[in-house]
Structure formats: structure tokens, C-alpha cells
Amino acid sequence: MSQSRWWGSEEIGAFTYKGEFRGLPALLKVQGVKPETSEAFMIESFERANRSQLVRPPRLYFTVPWSDTDGFEALILEYINGSKVVSIPCTEAELDIAKLDGCRIIWLAAPQGIKGTDGNVSQLICRVMKLGEPDASGRRSPVETAETFTLDVDMVIKAAGQIPFEHLVTSNQLKNANGKITIAPDGATNIKGVFAGGDCVNGGKEVVDAVQAGKVGAAAILEHLRSNMQM
């Protein structure tokens, strides 16, 4: 650890050391005054209660609970700044593996073009993006800016992605936000008897999210059919 900092007041009394833990940016904090509530407990409690798609607490790597005998508590946690607290389009495990493999992540950038010489790629032109307004799920999708930058490269690997089928959605008068269908909590759309869930609503998440949306939608469809049969 390096770059230590000391808060000397009796009310705080803490050392922090910025460095690395198992190859990842980390912060060691040693609390020398017994806190009313453990910082580790607060982080873990927030993690359990957090339902936000926008922010998350730092990850706890290691903790030493308060000891009246030793007179301190300590924790090693993820070192992050404001931009890294924003939710990311991958799992934390995937991001950690990429960093350990030496990958440099450039957030909020989209490829716009490729330049080459004598049949070989030489540059990648990228568009700088910014976060737009939150959608129904709370997630802010990237939108283009006028700014671009160029990277010198010798290889470009294309990644498969997906975009909303806006024509299908709009041509059927389905209420949507940038192609993603707007639904009620039970999966109902603005058209009676039409339900939606999964990627066409959230833009693409995990399989478990699609399964849950299917269960919610199935229950709502059954209730809809029962109501119509009783009429």
C-alpha cells in the first residue's frame, strides 16, 4: 500500500492507504476510534438493500472487526471514483478478469470507423458517448456526442450486440422508450391483451431476468384470460 492519509481528529482518527489488493486498486482503512456503526456493516447493509441500476457501494475485499483489546478495526475495499460507481454492462467478475489480463477499459465510447494501410488495420475511430435519461428500469443508455477520438491499433475484434427493432414496435403502436417496450409491473403493454418482457423491455440483461419476466407475464396472461372468460 502507498499514498497514506491521516485524519487526526479524535472524532475520526483513521488511516487510509491507497494501493492494490491482489492486483486490483484498493483502499486500506484503519479506524482508530470505535465507531457507533461499523463501516463494513454499513456497506454490506447497503449492498443487500440496494435496488438501484445506477449506483452501488464499493466491494469489500477483507475486514477486521473492531477489537477493544487492539483498539482498531480495518477494512480493505475497492478503490473507486465517481465514474466507476455507475453500473456497467458486464459482471464484476468479468471486469476483474479483463483488468487482470491487462485490458484497458474506455467507457462511454462507440466505434465509428476503421482506417487501414495496404489491407491492414491501423486506426479505430471512436465516438464519445454520454449517459442519457434513465429508462423505466432506471438504467441510463448511452447517447452520441459530437466528439470523436482515434486509437492506433493493429487488430480489431468485432463484438456481437443487439439493438431494439424499433420499426416493429412503433408500427404496432406499442408505447416505448427508444425502442424498448414500456410495460406495467405485470408485463402489460398499452395494448389490451399484449404483454412483454425480457430484452425487448430492458434492452438485454441476464437469463434469470428473462425467466422472471416470463413468470410474471404468464401469471398476468392467465389472469387476463380468466377475466375475459367470466365476462
Image (cartoon, grey):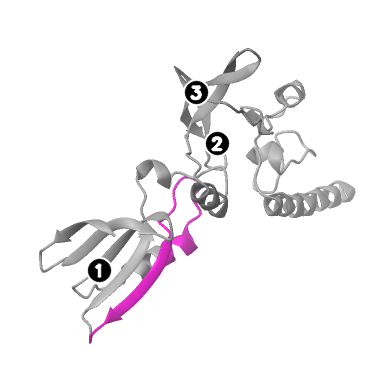
Disc 2 versus disc 1: nearer the observer: 1
First in sequence: mark 3 or mark 2? 2
Q: Which residue is mark 3?
A: 152
Circle 2: residue type: Asp
At 66% from the left and 41% from the top, the residue drawn is 204
Residue 218 lies in the magenta stretch: no
How many other residues sit within 10 Å of disc 1, few (<14), some (14-19) or many (≥20)?
many
Q: Is residue 37 visible?
A: no
Give whichever of discs 1 and 3 has the lower sequence position. Answer: 1
Left or right: where 227 falls relative to 212 = right
**Three-letter amino acid code at disc 1?**
Val
- Whether residue 159 is visible here, answered yes or no, is yes
Q: What residue is shown with label 1? A: 30
Q: Position of residue 104 (x, y in %)?
A: 47, 39
Q: Which residue is mark 2?
A: 135
Instruction: Identify the element where label 1 is drawn.
Output: strand
